[in-house]
Amino acid sequence: MKKIFSKFLDLLGFIIFIPFAIVLIYKLYSSSVSPWLGIPLVFVSGVIGFILTDIISGVGHWLADRYGSIDTPILGNHFIFPFRSHHLYPMDMTKLGFIKSNGNNCLASG
């Protein structure tokens, strides 16, 4: 039952994240004064977003490694365990599929 719920959460993360990302890009592009200004605006926003995401994910990664436990309800098995297990078995991340590797990130972002 845990595996089915975990797969559901991973897939749900993508289902929620992709439409939000598309709508965000469209709103950012369409809110600019001219179409020629929209493309650089989307690019600059993407670079700033990339930098902020790296900082925020680093803090989140540190928190998940430092606090909580695998037995924490809901978060423990789905978020804290994957964060801690990749330190013990770093090559396991390369054996997982794309959705399994990135589902938690999309769920947290969406």
Image (spheres, helix red, strand yellow):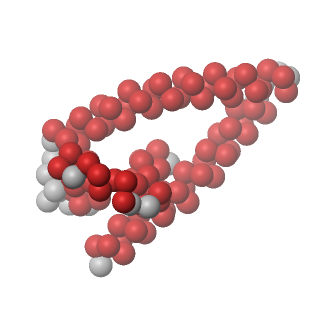
Q: Is residue 64 left or right of residue 100?
A: left
Q: Residue furthest bottom?
A: 1
Q: Position of residue 7 (x, y in %)?
A: 40, 68
Report the front residue among 25 and 92.
Answer: 92
Query: What residue do we see at 75% from left, 32% from top?
Result: 29
Residue at (67, 26) in percent of width and height: 43
Q: Position of residue 67 (x, y in %)?
A: 15, 41
Location of residue 90 in the rendering, given as x and y in whole percent from the top left corner: 26, 48
Quarter holding residue 40:
top right
- Relative placement, left or right, of 70 versus 4 is left
How far across and down, in percent of the image, does residue 60 sit? 30, 37
- Does any portion of residue 93 appear in the rendered image? yes
Q: What is the number of callouts on the image?
A: 0
Q: Nearer the viewer, residue 40 or 34?
A: 40
**In the rendered view of the protein, which quadrant contains the N terminus?**
bottom left
Q: Is residue 107 visible?
A: no
Q: Horizontal placement of 43 versus 62: left or right?
A: right
At a point 38% along the width and 27% down the height, the residue shown is 55
Q: Residue at x 60, y 29 (%)?
A: 46
Residue 101 as seen in the image, left or right of residue 74: right
